[in-house]
Amino acid sequence: VLDGSLPVISDPDTEKALKEAARIIRDTDDTVAFPTETVYGLGGSSLNDNSVLNIYKAKNRPSDNPLISHISSIDQLNRKVYGEGNLSQSELLKHIPNSYHNLIHKLWPGPLTILLPVPSENIHTLSKLTTADQPTFAVRIPANPVARALIALSDTPIAAPSANASTRPSPTLASHVYHDLKGRIPLILDGGACRVGVESTVVDGLCDPPLLLRPGGFTYEEITEIGGDFWKNCKVESAKNVKTNEKVRTPGMKYKHYAPSAKVVLLIPDSPTSDGKLDTFKQIFTSEIASNSDIKNVAILTTKYLDNITKTNLPIPGTHNLIIKTLGHNGEEIQANLFAALRQVDEEDKVDLIFVEGISEEDEGLAIMNRLKKAAANNCVSF
Ligand code: TXA
Ligand code: MG
C-alpha cells in the first residue's frame, strides 16, 4: 500500500491488455472500464478535464457529483497529487490526517474511500471536474489486482464512478458494462465477477464527529471498531435520505439510482420473526398484480422469510409468469448477488415487476438497504 513498486504480470495477454488500458488513461482523453473488488469502474485520468468530461458523457450523468480518485499506493498519491517524491518512511503519511491512519492501515487496499483537502498548490492539479469544485477530494486504494495494476502502470490517479449508464444498477460483471456502454468506450478489462458487489464505504474524517457519507463494502460497525476512539461517534450521514420507520412508504429519493426498467417493490421486514409475513406478502403480491394489467412477468428475490415460497403457494393467475430466486443467506452473499440479480431479471428475463425482500439494517444490511431503497424509489412496503 505504501510503496509504488510495479506489478508482476505473468500472463502475456493480460499484460498486453493492461498496458493498452494504461496507455489510454495516461496519454489520451479516453476512458477504460476496469474491475474493482466493489463494482466495475469507468476510469479516466483525475488530472485531465477532458478525460473526466468523457466519463460523464459515456455514462450520460450530470457532472455535479464528485468522483473518487483511485490510487495504487501512498507513494503515488504523494507524487501525483502533492508533487512530492522520495519521502522518507516516516513522512509517507504526512498528507493524510491522523484521524484516518488506523482505518487506512487496516482497510487499504479495500472498499474504503476517504476525503482529503484539495491541496492549494501542486504541480499535477486534480481536475476541478473530479472534485466538482469542492474543497475536498475523495480517494481510495482498491484491492482488486487488475485495478491496482492498471493504476500503477498508468501511474495516474484514476477518477472512476461505477461503469453503468446513469440511473442503472451498478455493474458487477464485464457483461453489465458491455450492455450499458457498448459503442461508447474503447476498452473493457474483464476481471470476472466483483467480490464485494456494492460500492466502497465513503467516510469524512475531516470533521468532528466524523461522518459515514455512503455505506458500502466495509460496514459501519467495522469502521467504528477499527478506526479508533475518534470513529466511535461516527454519524451516519446517508441516513438523511433513508427513512426506515415509515409504515407504508418511504419518501421519494433525491434522484433515480440503481433502477431496473421494471417496477421494484421493496419489502421491509418490520419485525425479526416470520409471523404473518407470508400472508402479508400474498396480499401485497395480489394487489400489485391487480393494479396494472400490463404486468405479466414477475420476479421475487428472496433473502430470509420468503425463502420457502414456491409458485404453488402464491395466488398467481395462469396468464402470468413467475421467477423466484434467492439473493443469498447472509449479508456478504446478498451484497455480491444484488446488482447482478436485479439486472438478470430485468435485462434477461424481462420481467415487468420485481419484489425484493429486504433485510434489517445491521452490518451489510445498511449498504444493501441503501441501494435497494434507491432501486425501489417510492415503492417500499413493510411486511
Ligand atoms: O466502490 C466504489 O467506490 C466505486 C468503484 C468504481 O471504485 N466507485 C464509485 O464512484 O462508486 P461513484 O462516483 O459512483 O461514487 C462516488 C461517491 C459519491 O457518493 C460522491 O458523492 C462521493 O463519493 N464523493 C466523491 N467526492 C466527494 C467529496 N469531495 N465530498 C463528498 N462526497 C464525495
Ligand atoms: Mg455509481
Image (cartoon, rainbow, N blue to C red):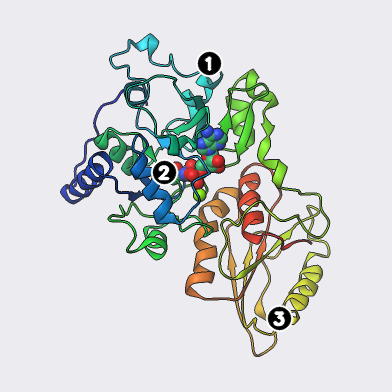
Q: Identify the residue shown where x is 37% and y is 36%.
A: 46
Give the residue type that dot 1 points to.
Answer: Asn
Q: Earlier in the sequence, mark 3 or mark 1?
A: 1
Q: Identify the residue shown where x is 50% and y is 51%.
A: 62
Residue picked out by circle 3: 292
Q: Depth-wise, is mark 3 or mark 1 nearer the camera?
A: 3
Residue picked out by circle 2: 160
Label 2 C-beta lies within 8 Å of the nearest ligand 1 atom = yes
- Say if 117 sits above or below 378 in the image: above
Q: Which of marks 3 and 2 is nearer the N terminus?
A: 2
Cα distance in 3D space between marks 2 and 1? 26 Å
Image x and y of residue 145, in percent: 33, 40
At mark 2, the secondary structure is: loop
Disc 1 crowd rating (10 Å Cα; few below 14, some 14-19, many 20+) is: few
Q: Which label belongs to residue 247?
A: none
Disc 3 crowd rating (10 Å Cα; few below 14, some 14-19, many 20+) is: few
Q: Do the residues labelled 3 and 1 touch (CB within 8 Å)?
A: no
Q: Are marks 2 and 1 in contact (CB under 8 Å)?
A: no
Q: Identify the residue shown where x is 40% and y is 65%.
A: 179
Give the residue type that dot 2 points to.
Answer: Ala
Image x and y of residue 235, in percent: 69, 31
At mark 3, the secondary structure is: loop
Image x and y of residue 322, in percent: 61, 79
Label 3 C-beta lies within 8 Å of the nearest ligand 2 atom = no
Closer to the camera, 121 or 268?
A: 121
